[in-house]
Image (spheres, coloured by chain):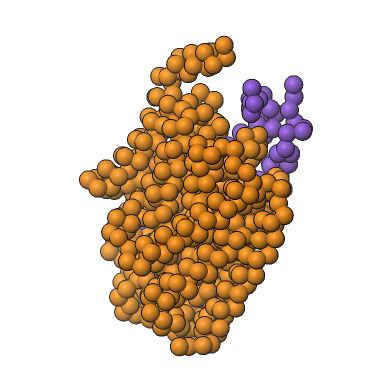
Chain colours: A purple, B orange
Amino acid sequence: MKNTINPKDKRFKIAHREALIGVVLVVINFLWWYGFAYGLGSDKVEHYTYILGLPAWFFYSCIVGFFVMVILVILTVKFLFTDVPFEDEEGEPK
Amino acid sequence: MNWSVITPLVIFLLIIFAVGFWSHKFVLKSHSFLEEYFLGERQMGGFILAMTMVATYGSASSFIGGPGVAYTKGLGWVLLAMAQLATGYFTLMVLGKKFAIMARKYKAITLIDFLKERYQSKTVVLLSAASIVIFLFSSMTAQWIGGARLVESLTGLPYTAALLIFAFSVLIFVIIGGFRAVALTDAVQGVVMFAGTLILLIATIKAGGGIPKIISDLAAENPKLISPFGADGTLTPSYVSSYWILVGIGVIGLPQITVRAMSYKNSKAMHSAIIIGTIVVGFIMLGMHLIGVFARPVMPGIEIGDTVMPLLSMKVLPPFAAGIVLAAPMAAIMSTVDALLILVSSAIVKDVYINYIKPNASNAHVKKISFSVTAVIGIIVILLSLSPPNLIIWLNLFSFGGLESVFIWPVIFGLYWAKGNKYGAVASMVIGMISYIILDRFYPNAFGMHTVVLPIIISMLVFVAVSLFTQRRISLENTYQRF
């Protein structure tokens, strides 16, 4: 049969792990974003503290959150992601 | 006419054309016309891949609509917009290497090719092609109208002339250059979008007298503007969070994004695209929406949200810089429209015509058909934009969420769940679409969340249930086929 996908292809194990990492990152991203935004932001506006002129909830949730995610993404890609060939010549144990 | 504003725009258009003609060379000498024209021969490097994803995703709403809403709602809307940061890494990581490997094995050029090989079902192909054509046609028209309005407001030309200028500039490079031209111009457009955001953000902060001053002005006008709940207190945590589905992780189901995840050269390209994409999309979304909020003290009393961004640029920037900044939304619109155009064309030519009407068409014939189908679609869209029928506007409202509800599970389960089968896929596509339209009509924002959430959950349950229920039938079918 043509186009058979070999489920035991070891490249898929890498791919599955990396997809899972993507999901974990989104969960971290969401918790950080939600936690700071509504944790600090639900206070009365008069009680807000400010960092660099921005309300603290916004500063931590959106600005710091952005940098944290960029750093996490760089670290995961550099250290956890593996280079694999996409073409069929290699990587297929038979 | 304000020539110092228009000059940068014209230069920008000329660069885009140059790229289109340059790409045409590849179309002419390529060995496999289809793979080149619709996928750029899977040669995208990391930077181009990142930029084409960001630019395709970032549309009129990121540069015109979004900042306009941020202007009225305050920082809460910037918070909501930041849900889009996830698109930068999530889509490529989750579709990831598995999608790239399977797509190559299947020799898939379009998302539909992939679904066709994975599910071996004609119904899946026709359903997908139909939803792509219907929904993207309408969202293309909407973007086109946005682009024409923008040209109209910048140059003072009448709407029809503005539309024709805008439309023909896009059409020419897409028709002759194909996917490669689209991706390369996206890279140019992505850079323009990034630079435009940066320039305008700095100029707006300066014009407002610094961030602390802007924030205290906002708080003095209405304290809720600097709270996460929006100026009128309507942005509840569950509503804002549900945007993580619509504009964050659900983006995986948008065919114009998915097709890009099979276009890259190697895993190195993918790795650097994830990093670049996250930085660029995060910066543009954060920057543009902050600009919208910061514009409020600088230019109070704007009634129509969509005009905030053009008016602000003209006010806080010298004319030539305003021209560069205003090239950004134009770039955003063009890069979305061109991606949709080539995708709709591929759905018609590759997925329907070659699959079912004329499977053994010669290369020369396919070439002719591809050029002419792309051109005809473009012209139809122009005609529709001249006097947009209500149906188009209505359909466009569903386009994003509708496509996500249709495609997200067939793609994800197709990749990661071996038991997912064609019955599950067909059922989830149909139910996803219908439930989205019905809920939107009769029960929008159920449980305080965006309408897209329920259809995505429902279509997942349907996919799983139907796939498990038809297990026996599928294995029987396979047995028969074998003997």
Q: Position of residue B354 (x, y in %)?
A: 54, 41
Q: Is residue B470 visible?
A: yes
Q: Residue at x 69, y 32 (%)?
A: A11
Q: Is residue B264 left or right of residue B202?
A: right
Q: Is residue B434 above or below residue B444?
A: above
Check the picture and name the quadrant holding the C terminus of chain B: top right
- Spot the residue most to the right: A90
What is the x, y in percent for residue B454?
Answer: 34, 40
Quarter occupied by residue B371: bottom right
B138 versus B306 height, above or below: above
* Residue B294, image x, y percentages: 43, 74
Q: Quadrant of the N terminus of chain B?
A: bottom left
Image point (48%, 71%), residue name: B166
- Residue positioned 60% across, 56% down in the render: B178
Front one among B242 and B127: B127
Is residue A35 in view from this perspective?
no
Q: Whole-percent x and y of residue A26?
A: 52, 45
Residue plotted at (56% across, 52% down): B370
Give B223 or B483, whichever is nearer the viewer. B483
Q: How many marks?
A: 0
Most foreground residue, A30 or B86: B86
